[in-house]
Image (spheres, helix red, strand yellow):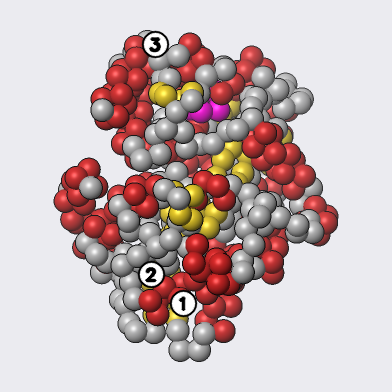
Amino acid sequence: MKRLSRIAATTALALTTTLSALSVSAETLTFVSWQKDDPSFGAWWDEVIAEFEATHEGVDIEMTRVARNEYATSMFTMFAGAAPPDIVHLAAFEYQPFAAEGWLEPLDPYIAESGLDLTGWAGQATCEWDGNTSCLMLLYAGYVMAYNEALLADAGVTTPPTDWESFLAAARAATKDTDGDGVTDKFGVGMPTKGASSVMHGILNFVLGAGGDWTVDGKPTFDSEGTIEGLRRWKQLFDEGLTPRDLGTSDMRQLHIEGHIAMLLDGPWVRGVQKRAAEDMLPNLKLAKTPFSPPVGGTSNVLAIPSDISDERKNLVWDFIQIAASEKYQQRFSAISSSPAPRPGLDYSAEIAAEPYFELIAEQANAAAAAGVDRLPRGLEIEFPEVGKIVLQEVQRMLIEDIDPAVTGKTIQERVLAIKK
């Protein structure tokens, strides 16, 4: 509690700013999300909200967007200030501290009463906390490689890379100054350096590919041989100028669909982003398996009910969750997001016919699941927000001061162990 209270105290301004946007009335459920107007998931949320409002006369849902980079801190602040949104939407790797604080209502009585069958629901085990079901999992996904076929072809790369060596070679070949002004305007790869979780997930591609991981059996392994090699490979992309610097994930995706970045390692939702490209660009934008094995994968985001609201509002939020979990809207989730939904037993024939990459996306998710990969480091669930900040600080310092990755790995390990004491 002390740790979260400190976070809340230092973000009073964020609280004021965010809460001012939540004009609550008796007939309004508040809903904060980073996915409002999201190109991959925004339309799905709009449909779920419309269905709820159509079936609950006199009750509206007010959805407010909070940027992903400041999302967890803003939510901590709202909960600590006893003003949580009614519909709780969190990343799967950040809900645990909220559950540990007792801020999330156990869903087991609602599940039992409604008869919702979660057998085989992908990633649902991650929502189990301290013997209770604290949330409903909305997505388990495996990473893919988004690439610009024309940029790679211009660089002499005729097939997508399949390992670190071919990936590095393709990135080098595709990085160019095409107008001769001395400034690189085409990059082989795009790796974010803003947003702690985004940076950790990006680096994890290279760590897993090098045989490392953030933890083993719940113990931090930031200084292990494989993890350090992964840090070295990630750093090499920046040292050689193969990726833009000082940009976040959204910036990288935008540069990709504008034809400035040849390869991105991202979740399957990147296909929805690609579809926003100009008509003459879209045919060049494709997906392939990531060059690294196993692929990054894991649970993505969850829905929950705050414990500190009235029983009437809890029941309304559960109704909303049931609509999101229904077969109809799970099928719509797949159709809109081009991602397999967590609900088992859906018919994907229409999705496969409409989206040729749907099977690839499903294969990557299965490969990540089979390898037991989760973006959330096991054993560091509660500390993950702080761990993410530590990793972000140290890898940025590694780039700026050209620090040996072995030193950075050792420093991260020591700092993470310190917060575990």
| Alpha carbons under labels 2 and 3: distance apart | 45 Å
In the image, residue 185 lies at what x, y percent?
A: 52, 31
Image depth: mark 2 or mark 3 in front? 2
Disc 2, disc 3: CB below 8 Å?
no
Q: In percent of the image, x 57 and y 58: which residue is there?
A: 41
Q: Residue 410: in sight, yes or no?
A: yes
With 16 as the anchor, is 309 left or right in this view? Answer: right
Q: Is residue 327 above or below residue 298?
A: below
Disc 1, disc 2: CB below 8 Å?
yes
Nearer the N terminus, badge 2 or badge 3?
2
In the image, residue 175 lies at what x, y percent?
A: 57, 24
Q: Which mark is residue 86?
A: 2
The outermost residue toward the bottom is: 57
Nearer the N terminus, badge 3 or badge 1?
1
Crowd band around label 2 with a 10 angstrom C-alpha radius: few (<14), some (14–19), many (20+): many
- From the viewer's side, name the closer residue of 310 and 206: 310
Q: Start and end of the magenta stretch?
A: 203-207
| Alpha carbons under labels 1 and 2: distance apart | 9 Å
Helix, strand or loop at disc 3?
Answer: helix
Question: Please, what is the three-letter code of the amino acid marked with disc 3?
Answer: Ala
With 1 as the anchor, is 298 left or right in this view? Answer: right
Q: Which residue is mark 3?
A: 406
Q: In percent of the image, x 28 and y 59: which residue is there?
A: 79
In the image, residue 141 lies at what x, y percent?
A: 61, 44
Image depth: mark 3 or mark 1 in front? 1
